[in-house]
Structure formats: C-alpha cells, structure tokens
Image (spheres, rainbow, N blue to C red):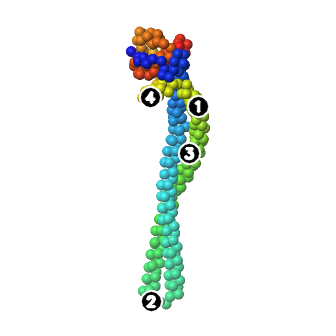
C-alpha cells in the first residue's frame, strides 16, 4: 500500500491540492532542465570537435616528427657542403703549391699528388652522400606539404565546429536560464517541508521525486498499482500526499484530462 501522509505539509484544503499541482510543475521543470543539461553535454558538435581536435593533434605530432627528420638531413647536407668546400680549398692550395714547387723533390711532389687524389676521392664520396640526402629529402618534403594542408583543413574545421558548438550551447544556456527562472517561481509555490521531501527523493531516485498517477500506473516507475489501492487513493481528501508503494515517489492523481483533481 502506498504511504498516506495526509495533506501537503504547510497547506490546507484547496491550497493542498494547489501545492501538489505546483509540485508537479516543479518536477516538470526539473525534468526539462535535466534534459537540457544532457543535451548540452551530448551535443554532436562537441563529439565532432573532440574527434577533429584529436586528429589535429596527431597531424601536429607527425609534422614535428617529419620536420625533425628533415632538419637532421639538412644539417647533414650543410655539413657535407662545408666539408666539400674545405676539401676543394685544400686541393686548390696543394695544386698551387705543386705548381710553385716544380723543382722540389720527387718524393714531396708524389705526396702532394697522392693527397690530391685522396681529396678528389673524398669529394666524390661526399657528392654521392649529398645525392642520397637529396633523394631522402624528397618524400619528407612531399609528406610535410601534405601534412601542412591537412593541418590547415583540420584547423578550419575545428574553428567552424567551435563556432557551431558555442552557438548551440548559447541557445541551450538561454533555455536553461528561462527554465531556471520558472523553477524559482514554481519552487516558491511548494510548501517548504514538501519541497524538502521532494528534493530528497529526487536526489535518491534519479531526478524524479514526484510523479503523476494516470489510471493505475505510476509515472515515475511506470508500474501498475492494484485497482483497490488506486481507488483508495482517489477517495483521499484533495491534496493528500501519498507515495508509490513500488518506487517511493510522491504520487499526484490525475483526472481523465491529465489535470490534478
């Protein structure tokens, strides 16, 4: 049997029935506010923005990796160019020295000639190494250009989604503000003791502390009450506060039109 706790605390007579009507209004507003909050948290733009942001982060990390690899190759290329320039300068200096020392000992001339051959061989090795570096740079340059385009695309998409999200959130915030103002008025119309009981039930029962009794079904747990119990509830004085024997929510009987009797 549903609990029978008498008239709404703090109200009497017709005021008691009115208090229950205000309580249902308060519950409807709390439900609407919860739905808006859920809608705000689950806006599709929010998930889309999170996905794009994650993808953008991956692109940015890959750009950094490719750029670091490219910079390493460029440093090696610069170092080879410096070495080639030094070798070329050394070769010219030896050649000039050989030209000026045509009368020098044969052994000295042979040593200078051998060094020139070694420098030429080293120059050829460095040239081959530079070609290899240039070949290695080409795919990195292509990938870096592709990643840069993708990053710009994702940044633009993130900006558009951010604007859409802000707009959708703004609309919901305006609705929440309106509902919040209406809730203050509705809560003020409910006697304090009844409101405290309702708030405690709502916190414990997933946001619904009061429910309509339509026919023989509780609008909170959606279970049917025995016909005799429903008949007993309808015979109680107007404004009597009863709770569902199944879920414990405050039950407010409804007429055939759905209004509080």
Of residues 176 and 51, the one drawn nearer to the viewer in this rendering: 176
Residue placed under numbered mark 3 in the picture: 154
What is the CA distance from the residue labelled 3 to the residue labelled 1?
40 Å
* Residue 7 screen position, x and y as percent: 48, 18
Residue placed under numbered mark 2 in the picture: 105
Residue placed under numbered mark 1 in the picture: 181
What is the CA distance from the residue labelled 4 to the residue labelled 1?
21 Å
Q: Which type of secondary structure does the marked residue at label 3 adopt?
A: helix
* Residue 181 screen position, x and y as percent: 58, 31
Which callout, 3 or 4, points at the residue further toward the start of the chain?
3
Q: Residue at image x 43%, y 82%?
A: 111
What is the CA distance from the residue labelled 3 to the residue labelled 4?
47 Å
Residue 231 versus residue 91 in the image, above or below: above
Is residue 157 something that shows in the picture?
no
What is the CA distance from the residue labelled 2 to the residue labelled 3?
72 Å
Q: Which type of secondary structure does the marked residue at label 2 adopt?
A: loop
Q: Residue at image x 41%, y 21%?
A: 247
Tell which tag, 2 or 1, sits nearer the viewer: 1
Residue placed under numbered mark 4 in the picture: 200
Dot 1 alpha-carbon crowd within 10 angstroms: few under 14, some 14 to 19, many 20 or more: few
Q: Which type of secondary structure does the marked residue at label 1 adopt?
A: helix
* Residue 96 screen position, x and y as percent: 53, 83
Of residues 129 and 9, the one drawn nearer to the viewer in this rendering: 9
Is residue 178 something that shows in the picture?
yes
């Amino acid at each position: 049997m549903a609990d029978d706790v008498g008239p709404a605390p703090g109200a009497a007579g017709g005021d008691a029935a009115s208090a229950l009507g205000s309580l249902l209004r308060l519950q409807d507003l709390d439900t609407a506010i919860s739905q808006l909050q859920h809608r705000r948290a689950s806006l599709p733009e929010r998930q889309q923005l999170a996905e794009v942001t994650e993808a953008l982060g991956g692109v940015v990390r890959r750009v950094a990796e490719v750029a670091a690899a490219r910079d390493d190759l460029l440093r090696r290329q610069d170092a080879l160019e410096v070495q080639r320039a030094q070798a070329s300068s050394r070769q010219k200096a030896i050649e000039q020295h050989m030209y000026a020392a045509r009368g020098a000992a044969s052994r000295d001339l042979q040593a200078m000639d051998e060094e020139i051959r070694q420098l030429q061989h080293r120059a050829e090795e460095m040239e081959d190494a530079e070609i290899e570096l240039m070949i290695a740079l080409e795919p990195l340059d292509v990938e870096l250009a592709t990643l840069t385009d993708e990053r710009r695309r994702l940044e633009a998409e993130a900006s558009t989604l951010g604007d859409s999200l802000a707009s959708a959130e703004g609309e919901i915030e305006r609705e929440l503000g309106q509902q919040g103002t209406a809730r203050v008025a509705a809560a003020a119309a409910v006697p304090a003791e009844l409101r405290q009981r309702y708030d405690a039930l709502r916190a414990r029962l997933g946001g619904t502390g009061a429910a309509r009794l339509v026919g023989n079904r509780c609008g909170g747990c959606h279970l049917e009450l025995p016909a005799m119990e429903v008949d007993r509830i309808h015979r109680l004085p107007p404004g009597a506060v009863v709770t569902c024997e199944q879920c414990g929510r405050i039950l407010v009987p409804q007429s055939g039109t759905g209004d509080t009797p």
